[in-house]
Amino acid sequence: MAAAAAQRARRLPWLAAAAPHGDQHSQTSAPWRRRPYPYLLLAVQCLSTEASPTEGAPAPSSSLSPSKPPRVVIIGSGPAAHTAAIYLGRAQLQPTMYEGFMAGGMAAGGQLTTTQDIENYPGFTHGIDGGLLMEQMRAQSERFGTTIVSETIARVDLRQRPFRLWREGQEHDDGAYEEADALIVATGATAKRLHLPGEERLWQKGISACAVCDGALPLFRNQPLLVVGGGDSAAEEALFLTKYASRVYVAVRRDVLRASKIMAQRLQRHPKVEILWQTQPVEAVGDALLDGVVLRSTASSTTEDRVLPVRGLFYAIGHRPNTALFKETGLTLDKDGYVVNEPGTTYTNIPGLFVAGDVADKRYRQAITAAGTGCQAALDCEHFLMETAG
Ligand SMILES: Cc1cc2nc3c(=O)[nH]c(=O)nc-3n(C[C@H](O)[C@H](O)[C@H](O)COP(=O)(O)OP(=O)(O)OC[C@H]3O[C@@H](n4cnc5c(N)ncnc54)[C@H](O)[C@@H]3O)c2cc1C
């Protein structure tokens, strides 16, 4: 019996593997829980056909060929993409991941490759280097059968399934596409930076684009810090930093804050906060670590630049979602360019296309939330493929 099951599992790898997944996830409160779990049924049908062919149980549809899994493609390579890959790989769906080759100026592995101390990703008591964490995620994706291609996707055609994808360099050759029965978009976002003189050298040595991520590091404790920006994010980040800093300066280009009234009031009333109106940073200074930031008035060209001694410079000037690829493809983006998903799921307006991570998240923007939605996207995708097969 066990030998027969093992033999069936070898012959029907991805379908057989789906069954325990179905069991496991039918405990969730997702809307599809109300229906019998389709791939569990398909697996059972298929296995029973194998066991007793004379009973005439229906064979699986040809589009759900057990020997030829559907082609699932993931675009991106951050925590969202790799979590999706691990789940899909374990479900025997053998995804292909386009991890990008400096896509949007970002190395494969995503935003975490630009930081050293990840202290808030569970499982690492003493924190972990961002690059190392992403290397481990990549190895885990490969371990479960993901094919990783170090290329950027430069063009997509989402008008029908299978979707068509073109690699960078081949986007003008109409015939040079690859196909995907389902697609997970996890292309992330890029925190905007000012690229000041001194910034490259002192990046992550006092300069960051994520106060929530880095603010609690020992480097910034009881130190004067500078936040750049005047919107809600800047106000939130500055208020967050007041927990650790001795003083928080906020450099605002204009003479008003763009932040909502309530956030602006909170910021202005905080005893540790000082707002530097009509001020912009023009240079980061320091040797091994940031020592100060050169500030310039935006109101008067005769006012001399001055150095503000701070140990931290935090950019809070917005993010750019990596969605240029999807403009005018039919995928719904919001006014800021983020992919719009069905609330509580990773479904988008295009059946078969799922979204995960910062590319659809302008609120949380954390590795753990990106990984969480990567898991959701894989489960939604798996379910979609089972439901639409045959
Ligand atoms: C300096 C800094 C420090 C941070 N520190 C922390 C921290 O301590 N803890 C924490 O939880 N979070 C931290 N974050 C936030 C965290 O990095 C992000 O929330 C997380 O990486 C988002 O993951 P993602 O999978 O959505 O995509 P990303 O990490 O943004 O990765 C997306 C990847 O997709 C690739 N890509 C884009 N377009 C294409 C394409 N067309 N084809 C192929 N590939 C493509 C990109 O090159 C990129 O490599 C930090 C962020 C920054 C900037």
Image (tube, rainbow, N blue to C red):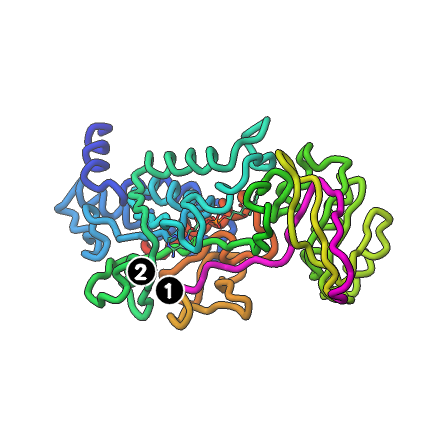
In which quadrant of the rendered view does residue 183 lie? bottom left
Which span of residues is magenta-colored? Answer: 299-324
Residue at the image position 31 percent from the left and 58 percent from the top: 168
Q: CA distance from mark 2 to mark 1?
A: 10 Å
Looking at the image, residue 118 sits to the left or right of residue 234; the answer is left
Quadrant of the drawing holding the N terminus: top left
Badge 2 is on which residue?
Answer: 388
Quadrant of the drawing holding the C terminus: bottom left
Q: In the displayed structure, would residue 52 be above or below residue 339?
A: above
Residue at the image position 65 percent from the left and 39 percent from the top: 286
User: Residue 110's mark?
Assistant: none
Q: Is residue 93 magenta?
A: no
Q: In the displayed structure, would residue 259 be above or below residue 366?
A: below
Indicate yes or no: mark 2 CB to ligand 1 under 8 Å. Answer: no
Please identify, in this view, whether the residue under mark 2 or under mark 1 is nearer the observer. Answer: 1
User: Residue 351's mark?
Assistant: 1
- Please say whether residue 389 is visible from this viewpoint: no
